[in-house]
Image: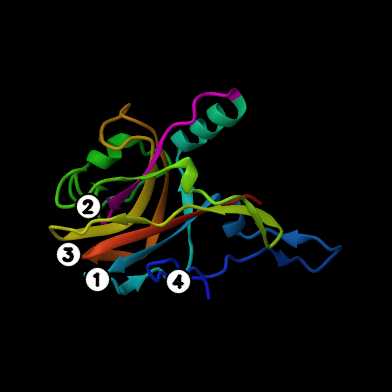
């Protein structure tokens, strides 16, 4: 079975279902997403304490749509990309969210301020992405597993986000590209770490 080096299980991604007539296929909601992700809590001894049971789809924010069009169609510079953790237990992020969302009140923004309590956003380099390969008839690439922590205070995580800056929680400090809900609100205890894997599938 496919596991990461730290023991996080990566289940297979679903493929389009047959429509049942004229050889066509029905695209499921899952097939309309670009990013999928899986998160896991790691205990201090390195064992997996919990993980998402399946891949979770992203929501592409307006700024992410703008970024993709600018880079791919208008040949603008491809920005650096960072994973951030969100506590949206009171107010979840939405399609119109910007970097200002990350600076919201408790339960409505980033899990921690970068640099505090063992937390920092984790950069995904271009070299972290695997060479594209066909999977179920669609090309996909997986990013290297990223680790947050160990935590030096309790964290609450409901979502991850993909942003274009290592710090900053105000509008204009970067672009808020996409966010992905975890399968459940997740609590990280002191000395635990959180790992996340992103996968990008085009269909």
In the rendered image, residue 153, in percent from the top left (x then y), is placed at 13, 58
Please tell me which of labels 1 and 2 falls first in the chain. Answer: 1
Would you name the residue on which mark 2 appears? 107
Which residue is at a point 48% across and 64% down the rendered structure image?
Answer: 55
Left or right position of 175 against 44: right
Which residue is at a point 52% across and 23% down the rendered structure image?
Answer: 76
Please tell me which of labels 2 and 3 falls first in the chain. Answer: 2
Would you name the residue on which mark 4 appears? 9
Secondary element under disc 2, as helix, strand or loop, is: loop
On the image, which quarter does residue 195 sit in?
A: bottom left
Left or right position of 103 against 94: left
Which residue is at a point 48% across and 44% down the rendered structure image?
Answer: 127
In the rendered image, residue 47, in percent from the top left (x then y), is placed at 30, 74
On the image, which quarter does residue 25 sit in?
A: bottom right
Would you name the residue on which mark 1 appears? 43
Using the numbered discs, state the Cα–Cα distance from disc 4 to disc 3 in whole angstroms: 22 Å
Using the numbered discs, state the Cα–Cα distance from disc 2 to disc 3 in whole angstroms: 22 Å
Dot 3, crowdedness within 10 Å: few (<14), some or many (≥20)?
some
Instruction: State the extent of the magenta-drawn residues as a range.
Output: 74-89
Dot 4, crowdedness within 10 Å: few (<14), some or many (≥20)?
some
Please tell me which of labels 1 and 4 falls first in the chain. Answer: 4
Q: Are marks 2 and 3 in contact (CB under 8 Å)?
A: no
On the image, which quarter does residue 22 sit in?
A: bottom right
Residue 109, numbered circle: none
Please tell me which of labels 3 and 1 falls first in the chain. Answer: 1
Using the numbered discs, state the Cα–Cα distance from disc 4 to disc 2 in whole angstroms: 29 Å
Residue 191, numbered circle: 3
Q: Nearer the viewer, residue 132 or 139?
A: 132
Q: Are marks 1 and 4 in contact (CB under 8 Å)?
A: no
Q: Are marks 1 and 2 in contact (CB under 8 Å)?
A: no
Number of numbered discs on residues: 4
In the rendered image, residue 171, in percent from the top left (x then y), is placed at 30, 29
């Amino acid at each position: 079975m496919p596991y990461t080096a730290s023991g996080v299980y990566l289940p297979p991604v679903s493929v389009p279902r047959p429509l049942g007539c004229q050889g066509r296929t029905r695209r499921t909601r899952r097939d309309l997403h670009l990013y999928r992700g899986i998160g896991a809590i790691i205990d201090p001894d390195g064992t997996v304490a919990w993980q998402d049971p399946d891949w979770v789809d992203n929501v592409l924010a307006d700024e992410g749509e703008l970024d993709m069009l600018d880079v791919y169609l208008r040949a603008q510079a491809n920005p650096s990309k960072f994973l951030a953790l969100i506590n949206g237990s009171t107010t979840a992020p939405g399609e119109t969210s910007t970097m200002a969302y990350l600076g919201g009140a408790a339960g409505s923004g980033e899990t921690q301020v970068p640099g505090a309590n063992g937390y920092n956003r984790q950069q995904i380099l271009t070299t972290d992405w695997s060479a594209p390969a066909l999977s179920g008839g669609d090309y996909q690439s997986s990013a290297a597993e990223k680790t947050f922590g160990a935590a030096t205070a309790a964290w609450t995580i409901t979502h991850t986000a993909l942003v274009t800056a290592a710090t900053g929680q105000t509008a204009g400090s970067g672009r808020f590209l996409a966010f992905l809900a975890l399968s459940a609100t997740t609590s990280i205890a002191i000395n635990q770490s959180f790992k996340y894997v992103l996968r990008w599938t085009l269909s």
